[in-house]
Amino acid sequence: NDNHHYLTVDLGASSGRVIIITVGNSIKQREVHRFTNQPIQQEVLLVWDFKKIFNEIMYGIQKAFEIEPDIESIGIDTWGVDYGYLSKEGLLLRNPVCYRDERTREGESLINREISKEALYELTGIQHLRFNTIYQIAYDLTYEQALLKQADTWLMIPDLIAYYLTGIKRVELTNLSTTSFYNPNQKNIIDTLYQMGFNPDFIPKIIYPGETYGYLKDDLVLKYQLKKVPVVAVCTHDTASAVHSTQVNKEDVYISSGTWSLIGKVLDKPLINQDTYNASYTNEVGYLHQIRFLKNIAGFWIKNKIIEAFKLDNIDYRVLDEDIKQSLYFDSIIDLDAPEFELGIDILDKIKYYCIRTNQETPKTLSQYLALFNYSLVCKYKHHLDTLEKLTNIKTKQINIIGGGSQNDLINQMTADITRLNVIKGDKEATSIGNALVQHESKYTGFTKQDLSKEKNRIFKPKTDLSSIYQKYQTILKERNK
Ligand code: LFR
């Protein structure tokens, strides 16, 4: 039998999915369970509801074995940077805090004594985002000593889930590389973390994508009627999994589009210098230590916050998409990464205010807001495409868009229009596919991704000229940064 079945758990910062992916001559997907995942306010902190997450995952795993008893293994991936602490007895000491929590606003100043922003970048090659793990840990070291006293182990979210499934504590490489305390050149954790006062014994052994954490624990197998299969460490960082799902050639740029839009290239080795520091580009580690050189853009998170703010009961997305097309005459533009949009609070007023400050027309209808979102997003794409070419000195031939956001054909077309490049639409569940492929590749050889992308992908060719929009965007940014 040439068909191999893998169970993938893909947890995003808006929703989670459990999908059976079958790898044979082609790739088949069977979605088993989908659930929402939102951070919750717990006392003063914005946290992830770990119990709910774990229960949803177990529900999905149980259902998956009912549908497909021949599942060979399980892989877990989630967003990056967040983590939890376990007690000696293996209890989760507190719900993992969400990276959007504001406690890290002063994070940078907390580690300033130890290391400058620039020196940290030189070591890790990670773009400065205020919520990077190192700043979260700096906060813990300053304000959470009581918690740390009880702690025995530090694990990132996918590793926490793997621990509760197998009883094995490991920290997976690709996700570890998002923390801003992993050195991708020397391939180790930087001493700065320990100089800050973090206990080195908290961090378990690194596990590499393709290795196995262990087998499902007996009590779970019994309770949920499962088969005792291994839990494989895939690229547990979702973006690493998503990018691993496609063939990304040297001249390609990928955009992994979901809560965030990650735009970048795959490189053989880290690219860390003064220019990449100034542009704040990141070097995350992928399968077989390939480097994802990329930039985070606040993506569909903002679109979702806009839609939420309109408080509509039922949204017919096809009608909405038509309305947005009709509203494209409305071309006010914002910088999606401006700090005021990060928490999604009062998003409509903040966008209006941004437009007033930059002498642009303010949006009124939902469709106008979303037209503004579309233009703002593709202007960012164009900006980073140019930046990527400058930084890597490689001309781009085409753009691969993958992930949930890749299903938006209007944005795909606008991306082609503004960049004057062909845009290839990939799979909505690219992350789960990449997750399954590492499970597969860790055991079997001979599968080529090239065949995969040809059969279903669609090409968007540049049509309408959007260069005047891009010029306007550049002027607006200049004005705003004055
Ligand atoms: C995407 C993602 C990004 C990471 C952000 C926060 O889901 O994992 O790669 O920068 O979420 O973890």
Image: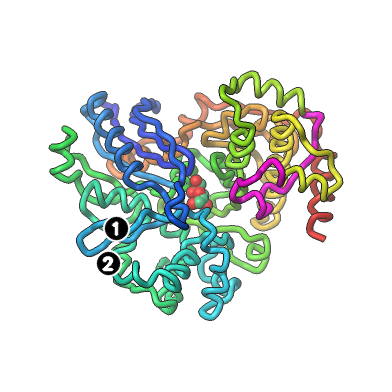
Q: At 80% from the left edge and 55% from the top edge, which residue is drawn?
A: 480
> Mark 1: few, some, or many residues within 10 Å (few <14, many ≥20)?
many
Query: What secondary structure prevails in the magenta region?
Result: loop
Amino acid at circle 1: Arg
Residue 4 place in picture, x, y as percent? 28, 31
- The residue depicted at 67 percent of the width and 52 percent of the height is 340
Residue at the disc numbered 2: 152
Q: Is residue 349 magenta?
A: yes
Q: Secondary structure at mark 2?
A: loop
**Span of residues in magenta:** 328-350
Name the quadrant containing residue 175.
bottom left
Tell me what residue is drawn at x 70 percent, y 36 percent.
374
The image quadrant of residue 108 is: bottom right
* Residue 410: in magenta span: no
Compared across the picture, whether 210 is left or right of 363 comes to left
Depth check: give the residue in front, 170 or 114.
114
Q: Is residue 252 visible?
A: no
- Residue under circle 1? 170
Measure how far apart labels 1 and 2 are at the Cα level: 13 Å
Q: Amino acid at mark 2?
A: Asp
- Indicate left or right for 370 with 2 as reference: right
> Which residue is found at the position 16% from the left and 32% from the top?
225
For marks 1 and 2 on the same chain, the one whose residue lies earlier in the sequence: 2
In which quadrant of the rendered view does residue 60 lie? top left
* Residue nearest the observer in this picture, 178 or 457: 178
Q: Residues within 10 Å of mark 2 (few under 14, many from 20)?
A: some
Q: Position of residue 39 (x, y in %)?
A: 46, 46
